[in-house]
Amino acid sequence: MTNASPAQAVSAKLYVANNGTDNTDCGPKDKLPCRSISRAIAHANAGDQIIVGPGLYGDLNGDGTVNPSGNSGEEAPVTAMIGTTSYTAIVNIDKQLTVVSRDGAGATVIDTAGISSSIGVHPAAGGVVFGKTGKGFTVRRAAIGVWVDSASGVKVQGNVAEACTSYGFQVGTQSTTILAGTMLKGNVATNNRAGA
């Protein structure tokens, strides 16, 4: 007699594109892609992969605010408390997801337009993958481009952080300096005020 193992859950792929629409069922291949990365994250389940097409994400009209109302396509920022400081996280990855671009960092930009005290990307859950070789993002004009503050096992790869008012990439805080299994590899920080 053979014991059958339970069916393995198959992770889904969700899509984001500049011609997408943020609605209640965007993202899956048989639907329209989402317009914002945040909406795809909201629709995803832990273990899913989000594939982002080339173009601009974040503050689309460059007015220094991010307003996801209606179908603006702008990101849905959240308040991230890191230590005792409050930051606006433009893209907050709050579950174990893989988020990659289709065409790489040169073609796929997350721009915060200099929103005060902003984090461009905040991997807030353990096991997040943000970018891969040739599948990363350019994150620009944030206070901190990509900040892994407390989640363990995060992988950040193939990204560019530029024109940030503090750091391009930061791992840990003053109270958490070692995050088990976290890896930054093949990223480039350029023209950031703090230099990293």
Image (spheres, rainbow, N blue to C red):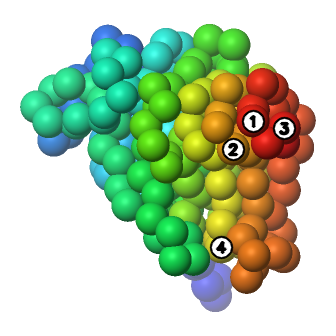
Image quadrant occupied by the N terminus: bottom right
Answer with the quarter of the image where residue 31 lies. top left
Callouts 2 and 1 close, C-beta under 8 Å: yes
Q: In this view, does 24 lie above or below 155?
A: above
Q: How far apart are marks 4 and 2 (CA)?
A: 19 Å
**Which residue in the structure is indicated by mark 3?**
195
**Which residue in the structure is indicated by mark 1?**
193
Amino acid carrying mark 4 in the image: Ser
The picture places residue 65, in percent across and down from the top left corner, at 31, 33
Q: Distance between the residues labelled 2 and 1?
A: 5 Å
Q: Nearer the viewer, mark 4 or mark 3?
A: 3
Q: Can residue 63 be seen in this view?
A: yes
Q: Is residue 86 above or below residue 48?
A: below
**Which residue in the structure is indicated by mark 4?**
150
Amino acid carrying mark 1 in the image: Arg
Q: Is residue 135 visible?
A: no
